[in-house]
Amino acid sequence: MEEKLEKLKNIVEKELSCSAHDLEHSKRVYSTCLKLAQNENVDLNVLKAAALLHDIARVEEDNDKTGNTDHAILGAKKAEIILKELDFPEKQIQEIIHCILSHRFRNNQEPQTKEAQILFDADKLDSCGALSIARGFIWVGRNNAKLYTEVNIDEYIKDNLGGEINGKIKDKTKHSVQIEYENKTKRLGDKLYTQKAKEIYKERIGFCEEFLKKLEKEIKGEI
């Protein structure tokens, strides 16, 4: 199995070019998954493979200017092909596919298995704290989005997210790090499944809040 996982790492590294969702992101999620899985009854081979593959189609989504590509759906299809080529058992393949389909915040796929819930939590923790700020500004630069923009969040959800909190972003250039915080990051605590993840989230979200408060004051020339 270790040989198969090493092959997955090599495949993922070639597929992911976006620095906000590159192999390093997948490796961090992988590591966090293992921490959250301690003392849990899970199939670690399913969890490890899902952690490595969960963003395998992220580049296709980022490069699709129409906004029609969902990297979770496309990623599940790509992962199935890869896993079959590596002779993963069919039961594990289907469990990994479910993990990938249900890992993202902006869709209606609920993680039903412990492995899927752990992957969801680990992926969301990588978008909290100092990491969320760093990755957020990488995303801003890549998508020509905003350093900061003051908006009515309810109107923004209606106009740019299809009226749903977890709706897909229509125009990425209108987005910003603090909008992502208001609309997604600060809401994640209620979405997490594992107690360990909730504890980590509490510490990380405090950093985000303080950073963005200071950013707003500096941009407005208040300090």
Image: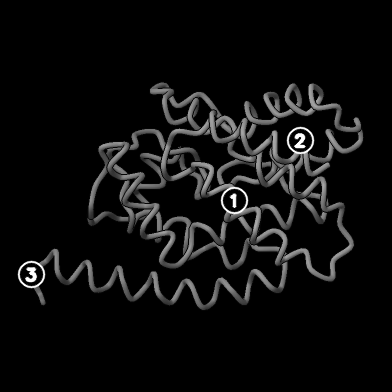
> On residue 153, which mark appears?
none
- Contact? badges 2 and 3 (CB < 8 Å): no
Residue 27 marker: 1
Query: Measuring 30% from the left and 45% from the top, which residue is drawn there?
Result: 140
Distance of label 2 from label 3 (alpha carbons): 48 Å
Q: Secondary structure at mark 3?
A: loop
Q: In which quadrant is the C terminus drawn?
A: bottom left
89, above or below 99, in the image: above
Q: Amino acid at mark 2?
A: Ile
Q: Position of residue 5 (x, y in %)?
A: 74, 40
Residue at the far left in the pictured view: 221
Q: Name the residue located 85 percent from the left edge and 66 percent from the top edge.
A: 40
Amino acid found under the numbered disc labelled 1: Lys
How much space separates mark 1 and mark 2, taking CA atoms?
A: 18 Å
Residue drawn at (70%, 30%), measured in percent from left and top? 76
Q: Residues within 10 Å of mark 3 (few under 14, many from 20)?
A: few
Residue identifier under label 3: 221
**What residue is shown with label 2?**
97
